[in-house]
Image (cartoon, rainbow, N blue to C red):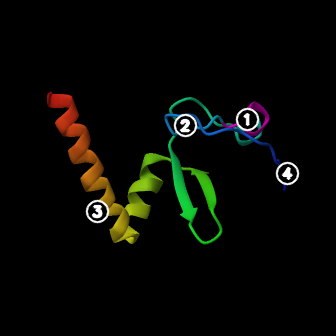
Amino acid sequence: MEFNVDITRLSSKGQIIIPNEIRKSLELHESELLLVFSDSDERAILLKPVGIEDFNEYKKKNPELQEYSKKNNNKKDKTNTA
């Protein structure tokens, strides 16, 4: 198992850049889906690359994620119609 550690900065838009060495070692590509987990007690964030099928399967097992997705999709629909 290869383990990489690096540092990055959060932009004013809430974006982060995954360092190039880590992107290469994980074979991450532009527009790839990343599942985001957070632990507020530890102030930790975990990103996991997932395919759309994996994400949809995860949503089925986690009702809170289904509800979030519904709210998020409704917001996108409203902004697209304006």
Q: How far apart in space, not on screen, are marks 3 and 4 (Cα)?
A: 35 Å
User: Chief secondary structure of the magenta span?
Assistant: helix
Q: Position of residue 59 (x, y in %)?
A: 38, 62
Q: Position of residue 58 (x, y in %)?
A: 44, 63
Q: How far apart in space, not on screen, are marks 1 and 2 (Cα)?
A: 13 Å
Tag 3 near tag 2, CB within 8 Å = no
* Number of marks in the rendered image: 4
Q: Residue at x 40, y 70 (%)?
A: 61
Instruction: Specify start and end residues of the magenta stretch as a single range.
Output: 18-22
Q: 10 Å neighbourhood of mark 3: few (<14), some, or many (≥20)?
A: few
Callout in the foreground (2, 4): 2
Magenta stretch encompasses residue 27 = no
Q: Earlier in the sequence, mark 2 or mark 4?
A: 4
Q: 10 Å neighbourhood of mark 1: few (<14), some, or many (≥20)?
A: few
Q: 10 Å neighbourhood of mark 4: few (<14), some, or many (≥20)?
A: few
Q: Residue at x 49, y 34 (%)?
A: 13
Tag 3 near tag 4, CB within 8 Å = no
Callout 2 amino acid: Gln
Using the image, tell me which numbered label, if any, was put on residue 67: 3
Q: How far apart in space, not on screen, are marks 1 and 4 (Cα)?
A: 15 Å
Q: Position of residue 74 (x, y in %)?
A: 21, 46
Q: Earlier in the sequence, mark 3 or mark 2?
A: 2
Q: Earlier in the sequence, mark 3 or mark 4?
A: 4
- Quadrant assignment for the N terminus: bottom right
In the image, taking residue 41 as reference, residue 81 lies left or right, namely left
What residue does disc 1 label? 19
Using the image, tell me which numbered label, if any, was put on residue 2: 4
In the image, taking residue 8 as reference, residue 75 lies left or right, namely left
Q: How far apart in space, not on screen, are marks 3 and 1 (Cα)?
A: 32 Å
